[in-house]
Image (cartoon, helix red, strand yellow):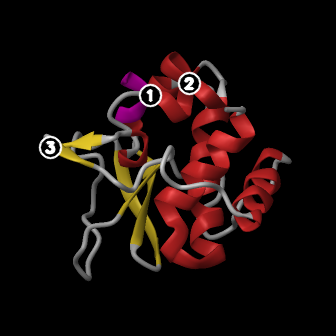
Amino acid sequence: MTNREMFARMIRCEAEGEGEHGMKAVATVIMNRVHISYGEYLRTGQGNLRLVLQQPCQFSCHKTIIGGMQNPQNIWALSPRPLDFEIADWALSGNVFSGVGRLALWYMNPFVPDCPNFFPYTGTGYWHTRINQHCFYNPTAAYAET
């Protein structure tokens, strides 16, 4: 599977129900992790999209088993559609969704109306915005130490 296809599959799997803006926001976060110049994502991703997409414990869509149970919503089970490739190409071309900008490094669906103020819960990200069901987070100063 090419990096482009893996990226398109991840966008679909992680944000298919979020509409085009939500999908672009997720794609922007993933590319922000590729391009960041410090912290955990530079150390583990090394500026490489595939390494970012495959980093352990980051994307539930990269797992076929979650909590000991089969995960049917994963990048191997969902084939990318033309829209998924379009958004992947958009992000790979350097575009950024303005709603999350170049800083956001995390997103999550809290499955409740309010976004937690910090995510991940280590205090390395602070709430920035919500787009549909996903909350987006920018790094705190503590992220630099990861």
Q: Residue 67: give its label.
A: 3
Work out whether mark 3 precedes mark 2 in sequence or the reverse, and give the earlier one.
2
x and y, in percent, of residue 124 in the image: 33, 41
Please tell me in which quadrant of the rendered image residue 50 appears.
Answer: top right
Separation of marks 3 and 2 at Cα, in angstroms:
23 Å
Whether residue 57 sits left or right of residue 74 in the image: it is left
Q: In which quarter of the image is the N terminus?
A: top right
Separation of marks 2 and 1 at Cα, in angstroms:
6 Å
Local crowd at mark 2 within 10 Å, few (<14), some, or many (≥20)?
A: some
Query: In the image, is residue 132 above or below residue 87?
Result: below
Query: In the image, is residue 33 above or below residue 14?
Result: above
- Secondary structure of residue under mark 3: loop
Query: In the image, is residue 118 above or below residue 112?
Result: above
Residue numbers of the magenta segment: 142-146
Q: Is 51 part of what is drawn in magenta? A: no
- Secondary structure of residue under mark 1: loop
The reply to whether residue 3 is in sight is yes
Dominant secondary structure of the residues highlighted in magenta in the image? helix
Residue found at the very far left of the displayed protein: 68
Q: Residue 55: give its label.
A: 1
Residue drawn at x 26%, y 78% as measured from the top left: 114
Q: Name the residue under label 2.
A: 51
